[in-house]
Image (spheres, grey):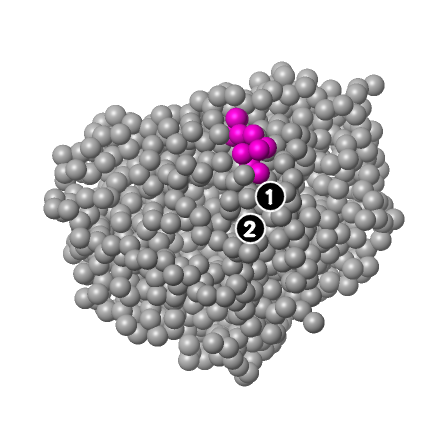
Amino acid sequence: MIDRKTTPAYGIIDKIQFPLPEQEILGNGLPMHTIQGGVHDIVRLDYSFPAGSRYASLPLTALAVNQLLQEGTKKYHARELAEKLDYYGAVFKPWITSDTAGFTVFSLSKHLIPVTGLVHSMITEPVFPEEELLVFLQKRKQQFLVEMERVSYRARNRFTEVLFGENHPYGRTLREDDFHRINREVLRDFWKKTYASSRSWVLVSGKPGPSRLNEMKKRLASLPLHTEEDTLPSFPDITSCPGKRHVVPMPRHMQSALRIGRLTFTRDHPDFPAMLVLNTILGGYFGSRLMRNIREEKGYTYGIVSFLSPLHNAGYLTIVSEVGAENTANTIKEIYREMETMQRKPVGDEELDLVRNYMMGDLLRELDGPFATAETYRSIVDAGMDMSHVQHIMETIKNITPGEIGKLAQKYLNPENMKEVIAGRMGE
Amino acid sequence: MPASVNDMIRFEKITLGNGLRVLVHHDPASPLAAVNVLYDVGSRDEDPGRTGFAHLFEHLMFGGSVNIPSYDTPLQKVGGENNAFTNTDITNYYLTLPSNNLDTGLWLESDRMLELNFTEKNLQVQRHVVIEEFKQRYLNQPYGDAILLLRPLAYKVHPYRWPTIGREISHIQEAGLEEVKEFFYSHYAPNNAILVLAGNVPPDRGFERAAHWFGDIERRNIRPRSLPAEPPQESHRQLTVHRPIPFDALYLAFHMPERLHKDYHACDLISDILSNGKSSRLYRSLVMEQKLFSDINAYITGERDPGLFMITGKLTEGVPVEKGEKAIHDELKKIREETIPAHELAKVKNQVEANWLYGETDILNRAMNLALFEWLGDAEMINSETEKYREVTAEQIKRIARDLFRMENLSTLYYLRQKEPLNHETST
């Protein structure tokens, strides 16, 4: 008979081996980061530009530019770009955040150079054709109106408005009339300012092979970048909306979407690594306190999570859930109860050890192979930091004490400092 | 054959005395191990009066097993992460952890294969969680119930006529402890499962540890499967519903061959020709050129028994649904009557091959695919899958399109806007 009652012996992750990125500043000033490795002959490219939504004066501009770069250039019609990318089996994914925008490209190594040619034509000579713009606006407007029927979307939007203020670049959200204010001139202007900025960078990961990597370098070094200092708008003061609870009434819905949270800080803040640990305990993994209480104990929801969103000039903590409307009030009460417990009672050793190991395992997954590492590294470069940040996080995970976590909870988890957004209804 | 020997997925396989099939795929480059346990049970094995059981049961599998009170805690404690999914055909459990802690994963998975030990309270809570999941994913989302309506329209006899989440909430509400237990003993057993270990696990060690943990679990009598075949559809079916949504939508479902049919890969390629990427036919013609749809998609459900070839689209504001429908049928007529150009066929094959490679970078993905192909009959098929797409000819595509895209093989759902104000129109 084998012993099934006792936990098998296990090891603790002490060190994590990961491919260290190489960094080089090319002749035109563009930083190029490289993470080589992998089994297959495939390459991932990440391009990042300071072209996030905060830098545009009209809300839809940054998104439209990001999406429409692939809809026609001086050299290629939109249809041709799509045909060629699809023929090479390349995947082209535009992405955008409040601060930065860019795209992630996957390509077979053998097609890397022609694929790069297409991508660079999009970056340097887009034409924003009238017809493609109109289709984009119509499509997006319809998507937007569908989203407006989702409790989760409404809560997310209202929450950023409440935290940062409705007119702040981090806080403002889309409105239906924004779709009528965009034109080609607006897009061209924004593109010129942001997609040739000296604050851009590129990350190449995978197995391009030495000669193709060299060719890539040449191509990247010939991208025209502004040499003078960028004149991007500065960061305005944050004025949160007054009042604690903000309700978006959606009376027909059977579930409410909840967002509870507060402003915190940027990734380079001294409390950031410790706050990652605190957040994991509270709502950052399946065994978190919120998940155990509100899903596994009460059955109010399919899921509840909390996370930190570090931006370039601010940051925030959010707790998110969709709950049966009749359980909305009780869920909010339980969320605050969990916060207070974290403030009042030190985390037990057993729970903390579990969280340490879980988080180290998570880092191991996030740094497994060149592509996973690229994904992790991207957000670190984006914050202007390097892999020593990961080292710092690991040290914190290993060494943080229950006392430090308690202090942090007292500092950041006061229920009275939280903003609440409820989209849906409060229940009968 | 795969593009190069490098791209082969090597594995070894044994069958334990109790019927459990064990596969090991060794990848020493990863510090992780993936453990995937596939059970040959899905919603097609449910009683028509008790739908949603296979999925509810998946939730209960985390409620504690005979020797281990909690599944998640010991796994998180060794740096592991896990999840599971249920579909019409299978229930699949998977985890990743640091490879030196492989034993913990096997201990947990083997104990819950041995015997469950959940309580009335677990069942009660998970019933609530699943009901909230039902709401969050299907009932509380715009267009969310379309798939719940389509299945019973397309299938009259086969159990694919209800969705995995269940036909209705009451089936889940009424689930009792005894019948749930009965479900376990008739479907969960070593002789009805496939175990795959992937990552930093040498085959000898993998087999030895698998035999240690799973070897003494007894075979069980699996409830024999005898599913009624869906008779050929004889005439076009049509259903119209009205919902509080902003734009009309159209859903087309054609019956198509089963997963192991020789025409399966050609059907998949037809869906790619129609809607994979921005150069695909439906996107180019109906979204960009004719501007009839804001969004259109074609895909196959890919089930083991004869599945569905689906086309779904949201109409551009103001376009009558009949006009959009006719335009789709015009495109389908082209595939039926005109031979696909060689370049276009090469393009969709390149896309399949490249996407296959991109997916293979992840060990968990490799583990799941191995389990899936073994379940289909032989894990070795994993290394000839892209070749099967390569072999599809233009003539075959035309022949299959003729067979698929017949009105008497089609169910059409008009999902139309109900004439009453939407949320964003009633609130500010």
Residue A373 shows up from this direction: yes
Q: Position of residue A188 (x, y in %)?
A: 19, 61
Q: How busy is the neighbourhood of tag 1: few (under 14 within 10 Å), some, or many (20 plus)? A: many
A105 up-or-down from B231: above or below: above
Amino acid type at image mark 1: Gln
> Chain letter of disc 1?
A
* Image mark for residue A414: 2
Query: How far across and down, in percent of the image, does residue A292 sit?
Result: 68, 45
Up/down of B157 relative to B320, above or below: above
The one nearer the camera, A340 or B39, is: A340
User: In the figure, is residue B25 to the left or right of B52?
Assistant: left
Do tag 1 and tag 2 residues touch (Cβ < 8 Å)? yes
Determine whether the residue tagged by mark 2 lies in a helix, strand or loop.
Answer: loop
Q: Chain of mark 2?
A: A
- The reply to whether residue B266 is in sight is no
**First in residue order: circle 1 vs circle 2:** 1
Q: Does the stretch in magenta take in A17? A: no
Magenta residues, start to end: A397-406
For the C terminus of chain A, the quadrant is bottom right
The residue at 42%/29% (across/down) is A392
State the residue lying farthest toward the top.
B204
Task: Write down the residue under mark 1.
Answer: A343
Q: Residue at x 34, y 44 (%)?
A: A104
